[in-house]
Amino acid sequence: ILLAVFAIGKTYMVGTSADFPPFEYVEDGKYVGFDMDLIRAIADEMGFKVVIVDMAFDSLIAALASGNLDIVIAGMTITEEREQVVDFSTPYWVADQSVVVSEGSGLSITVLFGDHDIGVQTGTTGDLWVEENLVNTKILTGQFKRYETFVLAMTDLVNGNVDAIVLDSPVAEMYAKSRPVEIVGIIKTGEEYGIAVQEGNKELLNLINEGIKRLQESGKIEEIISKYF
Ligand code: GLN
């Protein structure tokens, strides 16, 4: 029995924010998406187990830093600010930001300038971009609305309570497929997604990086990509 227990390997708590299709979302009561398959494949490859914990995107870094989570995978961009608090794996994805408006609104990329209301998800790189480039510069004179989830932001957009949302391009494309919204501009940020662990947790970071490498070499990552994109 003791041997069996050793063979099972460690269980790690994995935090995500499951409103970010196709990276993480809920389907039939299960957490699915590219990130979810990726972390499960890394765990299988490297011999550990994972339990997925869903929370607000903005709470993930603090939960990881305080030890309530061991791993965060949430389409999370590697930024200098976050690097101060957590450690990131090798990048596994590159994305830009998109400007999304309600279909038929007649709004274009110029929605970003002047008297329009712009929405973002709190604590995201889209939030930071709008704040730095439009709010601090006073280019935006309308309201800057921060939402806890993209689902709430999209609902407000469709209902005409906000003029545009800024969010990661792959996710904007997914939302545009299933909701009456359209992409009117791309902001070329070229940001890279990484998997985060607690600062200094080299052992786990090495396991994750080795897992990513093996999945790239075996072609398994490509399989997961073609399943979701
Ligand atoms: N990539 C963006 C960020 O890291 C958005 C991630 C998300 O909302 N899940 O801030």
Image (cartoon, helix red, strand yellow):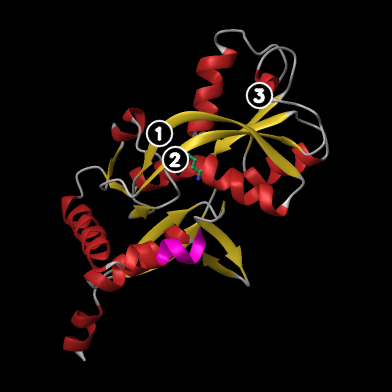
- Residue 168 position, x and y percent, is 52, 39
Residue at position x 37%, y 68% from top? 40
Q: Residues within 10 Å of mark 3 (few under 14, many from 20)?
A: some
Which residue is at the front of the view, 81 or 64?
Answer: 81
Q: Earlier in the sequence, mark 1 or mark 2?
A: 2
Q: Which residues are magenta?
A: 224-229
Asked if labels 2 and 1 touch by Cβ distance under 8 angstroms, the answer is yes
Q: Label 2: which residue?
A: 95
- Residue 224 position, x and y percent, is 41, 65
Image-quadrant location for residue 119: top right
83 left or right of 127?
left
Residue at position x 50%, y 62% from top? 228
Q: Residues within 10 Å of mark 1 (few under 14, many from 20)?
A: few
Q: Residues within 10 Å of mark 2 (few under 14, many from 20)?
A: some
The amino acid on which the numbered mark 2 sits, given as a three-letter code, is: Ala
Q: Label 3: which residue?
A: 109
Q: Is residue 228 magenta?
A: yes
